[in-house]
Each structure stands twice: as C-alpha cells, then as structure tokens.
Image: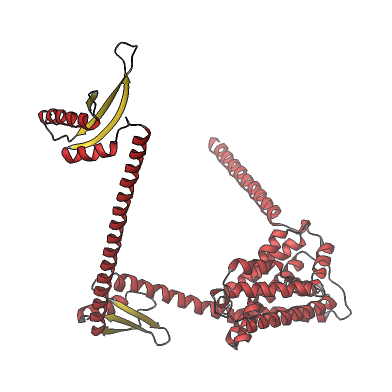
C-alpha cells in the first residue's frame, strides 16, 4: 500500500515537472516570436508609396546620381574609403532596385517596367559619367579601392542579400529607420562597381569592366530578391490582372537568374579560399624555415600556383644539407606539400652585397664623425658666448656698483688654484652684533671633493680665504663648508 502511494507521488511529481517544462517552453517560444515578428509593425500602403516615389530618375535625382558618381570616382582614384562611403550615402540607385523586387512581389507590371527602365537609365548614366571622368582625368592609377571591385565572390552575394533584407524591413517599418538605409547603402556598395566598370572602359581593360558589372549585377539581383521575399512574407496585397500567369513567370525568371548568378560566385569563392590557404601556408614556410634561419640570405622568392613550383633565390652558397632540409620541411605544410622547391644561388651577388654593406657602414661612420665635430664646434662657440655674456654682466655690475663681486672671475680662478673644489657659491650677508649697526659680510660656500682629507681641506680654505680677501680687497670674509 505504501509502495503504491510512493509511486503515485513520483508520478505526480513527474507530471508537474513536465507541465512546468512545457509552460517554460511556451513562454520562451512566445518571447522569441514577439522578438522576431515584425508583421504587426508594417505599413503596406506607405511602403509601396515610398518605394514608388524613389523609382523616378527625372530632374534632381539624375543630377544627384551624376554628382555621386563623380564623388565615388574621385574617391576610388584617390584610394579614399571615406570619400567612397560619402558617395554611397547620396546615391539614388537603391530606389529602382527596390521597385523591381516590390513590383514582382505584388504583381505590379507597370511599376516593374518603370523600375527596369529607370534602373537601366541610371546604369548607362553612371557608366558614362565614370568613363568620362577616368578618360579625361590624367591620374589613373590602379588603387586598392578600384581593384577590390573587380573580383566578386560568395561573400558579395551574402552582403547583397542580407543588406537587402535589412533595407526592405526598415522600409516596411512604421517610421523608416534612416540609419539602416544608410548602412545598407554602404554595405551593398552599388556605386563603386559602376565606377570601376567605367574605369575599365576608360583604360580599355574589359576584364575590369566585366568583373565590376558582375559585382553590380549580384548586388542588384539579391537586393531585389530580398525585397521580393520580405514583401511576400508580410503578405502585401497583389494587384490582380486578367493574365495572372505573367506574374508567376516573372517571379520564376527572377529566381532562376539569382540562382545562375550565385553558381559562378560560389566557384569564385572556393577559388579565392584555396588561394588564401596556399598563401597562408607559403608565408608560414618562408617565415619559420627560411627568413628565421640565420645561415640563409634570401634575395627574392615567388610561387607559381598553376605549375606548383616555389622558387627561392639566395645570396651566397646553400649547402646540400640545407637544401634537403628545406625540401623535407616543405612537406609538413599542408596545401603546398606537393609543390616542387627550386633553390637558386648567387655567389657573386653575395660578395657584392658584403662590399656594399661595408661601404655604407664606412660612409655612415664618416657622416656621424662630421656631425660630432660640428656639434663640438657649436658647443665651444656656446661656451665662448656664455663666458662673454658673463663678463659683460659682471662688468656692468661693477660699473653700477664698485663693491659688486666679480663672481665669474673668482670662481674660474678658484677652480684653477684648487682643483678639488666641486662647487662654489658667493653671497653678501648683512649681520649685526650690537643690533644697531649693520655690517656686510662676504660668505663663500665651498663643496670639496669627498676624497680630500680634512687637514688638506683646512689648509686649502686658509689659502683660499687669503687669496680672495686680496682679490676683493676686504677683511670681512667668511668661509663655509657645504
């Protein structure tokens, strides 16, 4: 009987725990849904109206586009990231792209035609503006900002897609989040690829042109695709046509194009990833096995990925043992373990480098000697100038007051007579023994060499006092020891 009661209690406890766990899970689920659900915070009509208003390119929008293209081209030419970012912020290119995605999502064929027409116009105008700038501008160096837009990969697809998601979500929110729109404009970088394409046309490099246009196409398609998906998720009302199959056909075409664009981007990403891994292992091999070896003098190096060959050029001799060591160590680095290592020696160059290094060292020493001599001369001139100034100051003091003390003269001669003096100071002190008449006493404080014996110090002080009294023509002199 007691066992049955115990089992019932255990069973009730289990059921209570299960119910609590179920309740906790429901609360977590509800919290997550409320956190991520943005369907209740959207304004369908305002979103459609705002996107439609940004599609047109007429009037001021066209001039804003031209100006932004010029700014972006200048930033790319000057290799200035800040200037390029500024051009992205003022660019109106995002409007027609959102219009394409929205019109497909709501089956608005008229808006789709208008969006594609304005987008094509913007692209042509942008390419023409960038072409004219780079064709007429005399400075056309291949900067890193330009070269960074000629080889897209899978990361550009992801940036465009998630940037488009953030942008359309911000657009559909009641009270558009401007900072999100600006951030997406910077992240997706629609302007620089068009400017780079114009640069490729200006210099006749069609690889640059095609690569940049491919990157721009990726950004355009996936921003439009993200817009399409979000508006579908939010259940925007579709415009009804008699021929509804047309809308479905356009949606399928957009999906197929996005998929076809993504395939080569994936292969590009895989290729870049492989090259990056090879580069990392190659640089590590050079650093740990070649450059850190004090017995090796590496002149230059190169790696041929297509032929799987590594060429190392050394100054001086490379022993057979060292060559075997390098080839064996190369096998321990993944991704380059199958590469053929070629060792090249340059004995004559080694001697030339040593001679050059010696000549440079001698020249540097001569130059330093000349600098030191010049500094010594300047120091001597300063000493003479200071001495002259001190003499002039003392002479002026003597002219004003016949009882003034020529301290500079006294201190120099005292050091000559008594070499063990380390420091000397001289002052006039007023004193009175009857508290009626004040007498002037000359007090000289002396700091002697610590190694000097007391008996010698006493003797020197007597001689010093006698000599100074004669120089100053006074009997009222007092010597103090520091």
- In the rendered structure, the answer to whether residue 245 lies left or right of residue 456 reads right
Nearest to the observer: residue 296 or residue 78 = 78
Nearest to the observer: residue 90 or residue 12 = 90
Query: Residue at position x 42%, y 76% from top?
Result: 278
Give x and y (percent) for residue 418: 16, 37
Nearest to the observer: residue 146 or residue 334 = 146
**Is 345 rendered above or below residue 477?**
below
Residue 191 seen by the camera: yes
Q: In which quarter of the image is the N terminus?
A: top right
Nearest to the observer: residue 117 or residue 332 = 117
**Is 35 rendered above or below residue 359?**
above
- In the rendered structure, the answer to whether residue 195 lies left or right of residue 283 reads right
Quarter-of-image position of residue 63: bottom right
**Is 22 rendered above or below residue 208?**
above
- In the rendered structure, the answer to whether residue 325 lies left or right of residue 161 reads left
Query: Residue at position x 13%, y 27% from top?
Result: 458
- In the rendered structure, the answer to whether residue 55 lies left or right of residue 342 reads right
Quarter-of-image position of residue 322: bottom left
**Is 444 rendered above or below residue 396?**
above
Query: Residue at position x 69%, y 81% from top?
Result: 127
Quarter-of-image position of residue 86: bottom right
Q: In which quarter of the image is the C terminus?
A: top left
């Amino acid at each position: 009987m007691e066992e049955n009661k115990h089992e019932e209690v255990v069973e009730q406890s289990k059921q209570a725990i299960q119910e609590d766990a179920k309740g906790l899970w429901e609360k977590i689920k509800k919290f997550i849904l409320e956190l991520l659900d943005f369907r209740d915070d959207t304004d369908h009509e305002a979103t459609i109206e705002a996107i439609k208003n940004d599609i047109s390119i007429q009037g001021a929008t066209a001039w804003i586009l031209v100006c932004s293209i010029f700014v972006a081209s200048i930033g790319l030419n000057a290799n200035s990231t800040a200037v390029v970012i500024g051009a992205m912020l003022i660019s109106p290119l995002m409007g027609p792209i959102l219009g394409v995605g929205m019109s497909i999502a709501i089956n608005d064929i008229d808006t789709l035609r208008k969006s594609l027409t304005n987008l094509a116009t913007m692209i042509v105008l942008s390419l023409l503006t960038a072409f004219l700038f780079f064709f007429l501008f005399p400075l056309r160096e291949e900067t890193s900002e330009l070269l960074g837009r000629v080889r897209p990969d899978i990361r550009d697809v992801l940036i465009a897609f998630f940037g488009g998601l953030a942008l359309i979500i911000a657009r559909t929110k009641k009270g558009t989040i401007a900072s999100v729109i600006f951030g997406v404009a910077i992240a997706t970088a629609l302007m620089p690829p068009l400017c780079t394409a114009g640069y490729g046309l200006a210099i006749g490099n069609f690889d640059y042109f095609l690569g940049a246009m491919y990157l721009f196409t990726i950004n355009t398609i996936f921003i439009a695709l993200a817009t399409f998906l979000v508006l579908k998720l939010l259940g925007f009302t579709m415009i009804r046509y008699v021929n509804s199959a047309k809308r479905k056909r356009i949606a399928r075409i957009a999906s197929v194009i996005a998929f076809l664009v993504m395939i080569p981007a994936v292969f590009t990403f895989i290729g870049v990833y492989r090259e990056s891994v090879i580069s990392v292992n190659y640089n590590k091999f050079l650093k740990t096995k070649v450059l850190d070896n004090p017995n090796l003098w590496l002149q230059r190096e190169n790696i041929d990925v297509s032929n799987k060959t590594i060429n190392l050029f050394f100054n001086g001799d490379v022993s057979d043992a060292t060559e075997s060591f390098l080839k064996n160590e190369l096998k321990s680095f993944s991704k380059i373990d199958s590469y053929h290592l070629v060792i090249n020696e340059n004995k004559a160059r080694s001697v030339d480098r040593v001679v050059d290094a010696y000549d440079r060292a001698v020249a540097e020493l001569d130059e330093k000697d000349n600098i030191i001599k010049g500094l010594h001369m300047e120091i001597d001139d300063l000493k003479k100038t200071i001495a002259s100034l001190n003499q002039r100051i003392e002479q002026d003091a003597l002219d004003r007051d016949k009882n003034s003390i020529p301290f500079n003269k006294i201190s120099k001669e005292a050091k000559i007579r008594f070499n063990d003096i380390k420091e000397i100071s001289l002052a006039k002190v007023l004193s009175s023994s009857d508290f009626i008449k004040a007498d002037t006493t000359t007090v000289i404080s002396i700091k002697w060499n610590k190694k000097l014996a007391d008996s010698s110090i006493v003797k020197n002080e007597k001689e010093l006092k006698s000599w100074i009294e004669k120089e100053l023509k006074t009997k009222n002199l007092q010597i103090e020891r520091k």
